[in-house]
Amino acid sequence: MSWTRSLVGLALALALAFCAVIIGSPYRSAADTDDFEFESFDVVYELSVDDDGVSHARVTERLVAVFPDFDQNRGILRAIPRSDGWIPLDVRIVAVTDGEGNAIPWEREDDGGFAVLALGDDSYVHGRQVYVIEYLISNPIRVFDAGEPEEFYWDVNGDGWGQPFGRVRARVELDDRLTEAFNGDAQCFAATDTCTIAVVDGGRTVIAAEDEVWPYSTLTIGLGFAPGTVTQPDDPREHWVMTTLPWILASIAGGILLLSIVLRLVLWRDPSRRRAIIAVYSPPVEPGLIVQADAIGRTKRAIPAAITKLVLDGAARILDADPDRSRRLPDKSRYQVEVLDPALATGDESRVLTKLFSGMPKAGRSVNPGQIDSAAGADLYTLVSGAQKKSVAAGYRAKPRGLWAKLLKILVWIAWAALIVPWGWVFAFEIEDGPLFFASFAAFASAIITTLVLKRPFLLTRKGADLRDELRGIRLYLTVAEAERIRILQSPQGAERRIDPTDGQSVLKLYERLLPYAVLWGVEDEWAKVLKAKHVEVGEPADFTDIVSIGLISSSFARAATANVAPVSNSSWSSSGGSSFSGGGGGFSGGGGFSGGGGGGGGGGGR
């Protein structure tokens, strides 16, 4: 077995050798461009104030990077914040050189709130490399609270680096005006609390340093100046464009919405009745039942009313599949419509019959209206939904004039569109939108609802209103007591129509003719009882299988009108400069300072 042990030992040796080669290879595929470190980060801030009181700084950063010996990096990235909170810094790059003053290729790309500099070209760099970046900024000195000391509160390297720094040092040089205003308050902050700071050169220079700065941490410095030393741009968040204009526009949009609702209710109404509703018993000769149903807003009852009229005209009959309730069939399965003579069906009734059977049926065919297929259901739905269009074509409905509505719709959308001004303000100054979003949403919702409210409806014309009132008169006749109905028949109007209230057969025929209108108005149960009583009175059998059940039959038909209808296809550089001061106030004075709490800073990495 010695040869076996030898083979195993050889295999293990080869495996270890292979791993050593892979680990030590200069072409490791898993190399990360951020896998390096900085020897030092030294920066000089030359602070000054111009005649207008605006502070400026000329910044010179000297970064010494130490890259690995294999091909991993082509240079570094430096992300410089473009604003300190809401205050623009107006970053302007002057030059990028190496330690000997030779120019280094660079490109700038503004990414969010940062000016990102890509330093170097496409060639790999190794070992110790020096990068010197010179740039100008405005407004580095902040006024946090009126009457309080003004501050240069600044993150030096920034906490957006994934590499450690062997040393970070900052030198702040003040011009004459700032030297005079400097109050002697100079502090530094670091994660280890071991930073040092010194004021030299008679208060003209401040030097701060920290050794061994960890990844994603920074050295922060703070210098205090007398109040009134600098002027600061007005806070764009407090400008009336942000604080007042959005709510004015939202209020205008909301006001237009309320006005639209009021005017619609007042101006867009069906004509009122000419006189008091009088009970009548003679059905209108025209139009058809579907248009009549639309005139009174009861189109869902149009189909059962039309089928009821088919039965009265002798074109069809109703069959009860469970007359003695022995089979206990549900109502929707109990009743069927059987065709007797399709030639007797006219007008809307003929169309309902055709849709119900998906074509003109022959005598003897039957259908359960509560269990029709989706195609027939869709056809019936289309017939009912087209009632308004038929009313318009016949002159019973029309759209009202609406010039004022067009004007209000234009105004409400103008109010919403005007919000582009504060939104442009937000993007121009790169500030948070705050309440602007809610104002915009309110204005947009008001504009949408106003547009819907002011969609011109199809109102009844005078002709349509007269039809409505006539049908209301029929409803009144259907719902009064029998004695009152007899009195109406005995009135001069009844006499003119030659209805003898003592002739039971004539009255029965009249009552039967009104049965579709009882269905239309939803009082078929009560009217069926009246009909049955009248049949008993004259000794004539009912034409229906069970006339008392006409209410259940109508309900089954009503479901058929809407049931089974087919659906109608209808980067993240770290910077604390903005967030530290967003609440108003801040700074390092009074013990409020901390590492990473100042403006500036930013971060970077390898490329």
Image (cartoon, rainbow, N blue to C red):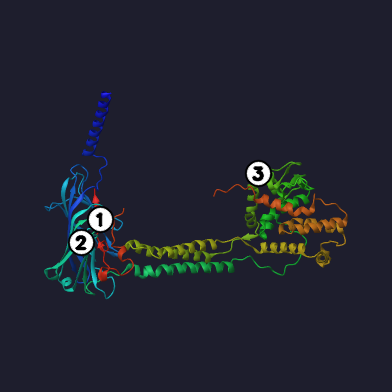
| Residue 405 % position (x, y) | 53, 65
- Mark 3 — residue? 373
- Mark 1 — residue? 603
In the figure, residue 212 lies in which quadrant? bottom left
- Mark 2 — residue? 194
Q: SS class of the residue under badge 3?
A: loop
Please state which of the two labelled residues, at mark 3 or mark 2, is closer to the viewer: 2
| Residue 269 % position (x, y) | 61, 66
| Residue 152 % position (x, y) | 22, 67
**Above or below for 451 versus 369:** below
In primary-sequence order, the first of circles 3 and 1 is 3
Q: SS class of the residue under badge 2?
A: loop
At x 64% / y 54%, what residue is drawn? 387
View extreme (front): residue: 1
On screen, residue 74 versus residue 329, left or right, reads: left
On screen, residue 483 versus residue 128, left or right, reads: right
Marks 1/2: CA distance?
Answer: 21 Å
Quarter of the figure with the N terminus: top left
In primary-sequence order, the first of circles 1 and 2 is 2
